[in-house]
Image (cartoon, helix red, strand yellow):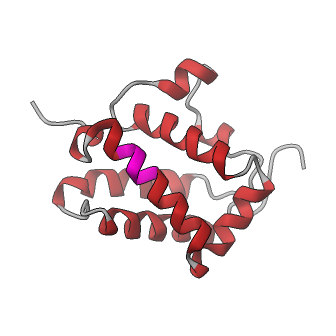
Amino acid sequence: MSLSMLDQIGGEAGLKELVEHFYDLVESAPEAEPLLALHMDGHGLSHTREEQFNFMSGFMGGRQYYLEKHRHMNVREIHAHVPIFAQDAELWLSVMDRTLQDLGHMNPNTERLRTTLRRVALMLVNDGKVAGA
């Protein structure tokens, strides 16, 4: 039996570390400033850190915290209020790659995760067309 993506990064503790490090980079890395601005136009980073963990847990094969709380895991709906351009998706992926690298998770076992994250990030590109705008 193969390990879930969540198990491959160390379970919930590993995911918590991943999410915290990712958003620490969003807050501190100069190149991530556009991501910080997008998050600050939304619910802010403390909310995002919590919800990212909740979502990623279920997304990666663990407990479905986000689904239990919100009754769905529709990523397009979750991000409908955010103007997302291709360069934003690529930047998000770049910061996530740096996070995986920093935490020692950049290896063949995480290729499936990286491929899946790329597919989802690019699916969210809306060229600035946000719901309700």
Give the camera-side residue of 88 and 41: 41
The overriding secondary structure of the stretch rendered in magenta is: helix
Q: Going by the image, does 91 lie left or right of 107? A: right
Where 67 sits versus 33, above or below? above
Residue at the location (49% across, 40% down)? 53
Q: Residue furthest left?
A: 1
Find residue 27 and report its horizontal and vertical position in percent.
61, 67
The quadrant where residue 63 appears = top left
Find residue 78 and report its horizontal and vertical position in percent.
66, 39
Residue at the location (68% across, 46% down)? 79
Please give the range of residues in magenta.
Answer: 15-19
Q: Evaluate whether residue 4 shows in this view.
A: yes
Q: Residue furthest right?
A: 133
Q: Going by the image, does 120 lie left or right of 116? A: right
Q: Evaluate whether residue 85 shows in this view.
A: no
Give the quadrant of the N terminus. top left
Whether residue 105 appears in magenta in the rendering, the answer is no
Residue at the location (19% across, 63% down)? 107
Whether residue 17 appears in magenta in the rendering, the answer is yes
Find residue 9 and report its horizontal and vertical position in percent.
26, 47
Give the camera-side residue of 89 and 42: 42
Find residue 100 and report its horizontal and vertical position in percent.
33, 62
Q: Going by the image, does 84 lie left or right of 81? A: left
